[in-house]
Amino acid sequence: MPKIRDGRPSDAASIAAIYNESIAARDSTMQTTPVVPERVAARIRGLGPREALLVMVASTGVLGYGMLKQYSDRNGYRYTAETSVYLRRARTGEGLGSKIQEALIRRARSADYHHLVAKLWADNERSRALHRKFGYELVGIQQEVGFVEGEWRDIAILQKVLGEESVGE
C-alpha cells in the first residue's frame, strides 16, 4: 500500500525522473529541458516553512509527488498557495493523483492557507478533472501564454477557496 510522506533530498533522482517524463511528453509543463536531481534536492532543501514536496512511495519506489508552494512572497498573498501533482506515467488512472491531491489540501489547511491555485495546460482534461473533483473551479484561460515545440499553449487557472477555518488572523 503506497504511503505519502515529506520528500527528502534522497528522493531527488526519482522526483526528477517523474518530472522528466512529463517534460518529454510535452503535455503538462512549460519546462522543456530535463531537470537534474541536484536541482530537485536544492528545491527540497529550500522549501519555506509553509511549503511542502510530498512523495507517494511504495515498495517499488516513488510513484508520484505533489508540491505545495507559496504563491508569492508578497505579504498580501500569504494565505495563497499553488499546488501541482505529477505521477509516473505508467501509474496514471489508478487514483494515486487523488491521494496526493488530498494530502496537499490537508497540508495547505494545516499551513493556514485559505486559497489554492493550480495552473494547467488548458487541454489537459485529466488534470482538470482531478482538480474539479476536489472543488477547484476554472477562473480563466491565459491564451497563448507559453510556447512549446513551436506551438502557443493556453493555461487554465483554477482555484479552490478553503474557507474561513483556514485563515489564521
Image: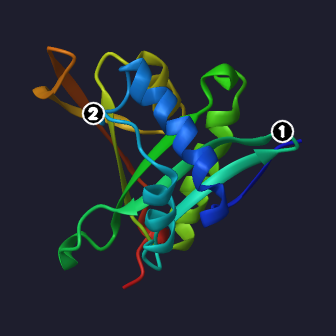
Q: Residues within 10 Å of mark 1 (few under 14, many from 20)?
A: few
Mark 2 nearby-residue class (10 Å; few <14, some 14–19, many ≥20): some
Count of numbered labels shown in the rendering: 2
Q: What is the secondary structure assignment of the residue under circle 1? A: loop
Residue at 66% over, 62% down: 10
Residue 28 sits in which quadrant? top left
Given residues 55 and 128, the one toward you in this image is 55
- What residue do we see at 49% from left, 38% from top? 19
Q: Amino acid at mark 2?
A: Met
| Dot label at residue 60 | 1
From the top left corner, tell me how far across and down residue 11 is, in percent.
Answer: 65, 56
Indicate the position of residue 96 as horizontal and vertical percent values: 69, 34
Give whichever of 155, 19 is nearer the camera: 19
Query: Which residue type does callout 1 highlight?
Result: Thr
Residue 48 x, y percent position in the rendering: 42, 76
User: Dividing the image into 4 quarters, which one contains the C terminus?
Assistant: bottom left
Is residue 134 visible from the viewing direction of this image?
Answer: no
Picture layout, residue 37 above or below residue 108:
above
Which numbered disc covers residue 149?
A: none
Where the N terminus falls, by quadrant?
A: top right
The residue under label 2 is: 30
What is the C-alpha distance between the residues marked 2 and 1? 29 Å
- Helix, strand or loop at mark 2: loop
Q: Residue at x 48, y 56 (%)?
A: 40
- Which residue corresponds to the image point at 67% horizontal and 20% vertical from the top-left? 90
> In the picture shown, does residue 29 fall above or below 41?
above
User: Is 19 positioned to the left or the right of 100 in the image?
Assistant: left
Q: Is residue 10 left or right of residue 128?
A: right
Residue 73 falls left or right of residue 69: left
Mark 2 / mark 1, whichever is N-terminal: 2
Residue 78 position, x and y percent, is 29, 74
| Residue 95 figure quarter | top right
